[in-house]
Image (spheres, rainbow, N blue to C red):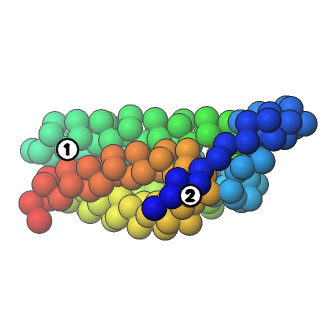
Amino acid sequence: MSDDFVLDVTRIREQVRQKMDAGAVTGTYGHDKNRVIEVLNDVVATEVVCWLRYTRHAISASGIDRAQVSAEFTEHAKEEMDHALRAAERINQLGGSPDFDPAKLAQRSHTDYTTPPDNDLNTMLRDNLEAERIVISTYQEIIRWLGEGDPTTRRLMESILEEEEEHADDLVDLLGI
């Protein structure tokens, strides 16, 4: 097996110097930057809707198991907002603008915003588990699509996916299924 890797630093320096205004995106970026930004803005919308749903459920939950369920929803809500902010930061790094327009969030989100009755903790848990499962599936597809073309965004999505899988596991435990 031969090691034919050769790094032409002179060529890279010249190419980079020609497009300094492109910031973090260099000529070796392997995707359509605008399409990645569009996909990430959908991730931002999804995460904000999840944050809103978890926050609403944490505040409005009532019943005998309220304390435990509400605490879990509050923890998940904080992590969902962190996911949205991390995706928005990546959009900015790619030279795009994060889209937090409230009028468009629900349209672009992969999940729904639900408002079950305050005393229906089972439906709240199931709604959030359904949303987590949707997010897990869509983020897996995004990760496969990104492949090696944008390893930074792929790693970001993998990190978020890991936390979403933990959320689903937590919800399954609370549901006892």
Q: How crowded is mark 2: few (under 14 residues within 10 Å), some or many (20 or more)?
A: some
Of the residues shown, which amino acid type is indicated by label 1?
Val
Q: How crowded is mark 1: few (under 14 residues within 10 Å), some or many (20 or more)?
A: many
Residue visible at 9% across and 44% down in the picture: 64
Please give the label number shown on residue 146: none
Label 2, secondary structure: give it. loop
Of the residues shown, which amino acid type is indicated by label 2?
Glu
Label 1, secondary structure: give it. helix
Residue visible at 53% across and 37% down in the picture: 86
Residue 111 visible to the viewer: no
59 relative to 34, above or below: above
Residue visible at 61% across and 35% down in the picture: 89
Relative to 94, 129 lies left or right = left
Relative to 163, 177 lies left or right = left
Q: Quadrant of the N terminus?
A: bottom left
Q: In which quarter of the image is residue 4?
A: bottom right
Residue visible at 21% across and 55% down in the picture: 169
In percent of width and height, residue 136 lies at 38, 61
Residue where numbered disc 1 is placed? 69
